[in-house]
Image (cartoon, rainbow, N blue to C red):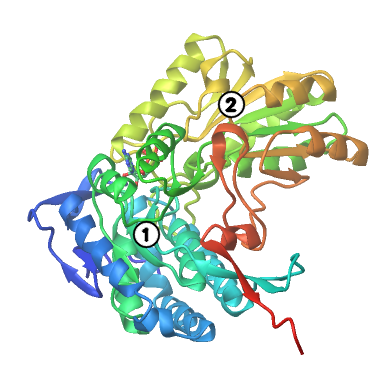
């Protein structure tokens, strides 16, 4: 059940299956975005703590360590055990997430289920990762082995703290890697509680380590550490570039899941009401704090006015309020920085000539709530049509032909997701083949599935998470050739 005051049990760094203070003794506050007030102080990890965490993860990855000696099925069983504990503590985890992140409790419950799905999907791979036998030239038996990369650094954002953790832990653990993770400084609490479940599930010490702290300190220490063989990052393009540069010094493998400015194209033949609902969910989900948010809603001229009317009506019905209230659909933005940034974008939208149809201001007086906002008459050159806002702002843009809108949809450095709403199979096929995006949705949106690869074209990222490709991210391929007897 929803409870706005869950007991906070873990606030320390997790290394070697123990909760410890930061070497520096420093802490930082994590804030409740609904009230703008501190929840609790959390240990602030830095280079010294990352060094200890990597040491533990490296020892756990030693070829003679229990984790490396374990059957793949035993690794999977540990993940299933963790899933069972998450199911047991489902509501507690959801409450903790709502408190720290601000998302409505019901959405947080959904996130726990999504996290479980990602872990289960990954666990099922554990004993199905196989190499090939290769018909090589010469008298050799040649085969490939798929081996875990080693110690992996994982740096995650605050918008889906548990989900992003599961998307990264799942493949790493299923393949037999060991983990040093840094949760976002805004939302460390669920990651730390999940560490207690890792221990309870019986994972060997050092397999999972979590160091809360800030990006330029703890995050940087992970990205440059010589014993971290891969870094997996989800977050902004700006920080993704920094991490890639940081990782270059030790030539780490890098996977990046970055931002987007995703186009959703609504064609004249669409049912306006249905299309408006798809667009509404696509942009306002998680208070717009979604890398795949449909932030450029392109609507064909024949239904443009009717669509704007419907979209505005829908946005007005969205129930903004306390994340723990049963009927709340929309909570606060995650912190003051984001809150101010989004309001800044809204001001820019107005100044540059977009028409504010609804919203545009803070909701209430406390916390970081922003009313669902709809702009019409948006044009491609406006800042709100070009930059990632990461807030509840819908920009409705007019187009004439499919050909033209494909060019405009692709005229961006991003390429994470795209969608089209149409009754025409031809439109759907032409668009989905031509649009430069890692995920394309037809007559739906946000249809992310753990079984399918997810990631970005262009500056929206490198690599694909989840699906088979997501497992591959954590594997090295080794070719072994054995000389065959030449006489029988
Ligand atoms: P957002 O814009 O969603 O807040 P960021 O890209 O700023 O996302 O942050 C995502 C994650 O990257 C967070 O865990 C943050 O602490 C971390 N981070 C920020 N700067 C760095 C850095 N220089 N090196 C490594 N990690 C960083």
Is there CB contact under 8 Å for labels 1 and 2?
A: no
Quadrant containing the N terminus is bottom left
Residue at the extreme front of the image, as rendered: 487
Distance Cα–Cα, label 1 vs label 2: 32 Å
Question: Ligand 1 appears in which quadrant?
Answer: top left
> Residue 413: which numbered mark, if any?
2
Q: Is residue 251 above or below residue 191?
A: above
Count of numbered badges drawn on the protein: 2
- Circle 2 residues within 10 Å: few <14, some 14–19, many ≥20: some
Q: Is residue 113 visible?
A: no
Nearer the observer, disc 1 or disc 2? Answer: 2
Which residue is painted at 67% across and 52% down in the image?
447
Quadrant containing the C terminus is bottom right
Which residue is painted at 45% across and 47% down in the image?
234
- Circle 1 residues within 10 Å: few <14, some 14–19, many ≥20: many
Whichever of callouts 1 and 2 sits on the residue coming sooner in the sequence is 1
Q: Is residue 153 visible?
A: yes
- Nearer to us in this view, 166 or 335: 166
Asked if disc 2 is less than 8 Å from ligand 1, the answer is: no
Q: Give the residue at mark 1.
A: 97
- Nearer to us in this view, 207 or 323: 207
Q: Is residue 167 left or right of residue 94?
A: right
Quadrant of the rendered image containing residue 141: bottom right
Residue at disc 2, secondary structure: loop
Q: Is residue 239 above or below residue 302?
A: below
């Amino acid at each position: 059940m929803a409870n706005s005051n869950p007991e906070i049990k873990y606030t320390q760094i997790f290394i070697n299956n123990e909760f410890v203070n930061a070497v520096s003794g420093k802490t930082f506050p994590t804030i409740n975005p609904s009230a703008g007030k501190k929840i609790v102080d959390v240990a602030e990890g830095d280079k010294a703590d990352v060094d200890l965490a990597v040491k533990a993860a490296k020892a756990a990855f030693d070829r003679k360590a229990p984790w490396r000696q374990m059957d793949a099925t035993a690794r999977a069983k540990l993940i299933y055990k963790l899933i069972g504990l998450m199911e047991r503590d489902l509501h507690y985890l959801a409450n903790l997430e709502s408190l720290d992140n601000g998302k409505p409790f019901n959405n947080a419950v959904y996130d726990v289920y999504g996290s479980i799905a990602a872990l289960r999907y990954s666990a099922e791979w554990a004993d199905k990762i196989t190499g090939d036998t290769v018909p090589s030239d010469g008298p050799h038996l040649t085969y490939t082995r798929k081996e875990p990369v080693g110690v992996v650094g994982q740096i995650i954002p605050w918008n889906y703290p548990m989900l992003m953790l599961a998307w990264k832990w799942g493949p790493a653990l299923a393949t037999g890697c060991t983990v040093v993770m840094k949760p976002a400084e805004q939302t460390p609490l669920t990651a730390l509680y999940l560490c207690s479940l890792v221990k309870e599930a019986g994972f060997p010490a050092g397999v999972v380590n979590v160091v809360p702290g800030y990006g330029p300190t703890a995050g940087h220490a992970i990205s440059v550490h010589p014993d971290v063989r891969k870094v997996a990052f989800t977050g902004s393009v700006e920080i993704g570039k920094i991490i890639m540069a940081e990782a270059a010094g030790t030539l780490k493998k890098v996977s990046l899941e970055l931002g987007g400015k995703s186009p959703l194209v609504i064609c004249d033949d669409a049912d306006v009401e249905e299309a408006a609902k798809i667009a509404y969910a696509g942009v306002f989900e998680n208070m717009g704090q979604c890398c795949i948010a449909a932030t450029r809603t392109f609507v064909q001229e024949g239904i443009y006015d009717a669509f704007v009317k419907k979209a505005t009506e829908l946005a007005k019905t969205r129930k903004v309020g306390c994340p723990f209230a049963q009927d709340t659909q929309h909570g606060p933005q995650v912190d003051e920085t984001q809150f101010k940034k989004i309001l800044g974008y809204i001001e820019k939208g107005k100044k540059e000539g977009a028409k504010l149809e609804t919203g545009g201001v803070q909701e209430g007086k406390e916390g970081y709530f922003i009313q669902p906002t709809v702009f019409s008459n948006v044009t491609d050159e406006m800042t709100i049509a070009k930059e990632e806002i990461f807030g509840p702002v819908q920009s409705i843009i007019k187009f004439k032909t499919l050909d033209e809108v494909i060019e405009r949809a692709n005229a961006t450095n991003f390429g994470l997701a795209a969608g089209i709403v149409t009754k025409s199979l031809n439109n759907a096929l032409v668009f989905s083949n031509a649009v430069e995006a890692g995920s394309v949705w037809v007559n739906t949106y946000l249809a992310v599935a753990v079984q399918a690869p997810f990631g970005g074209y262009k500056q929206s990222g490198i690599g694909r998470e989840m699906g088979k490709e997501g497992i591959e991210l954590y594997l090295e391929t080794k070719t072994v050739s054995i000389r065959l007897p030449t006489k029988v």
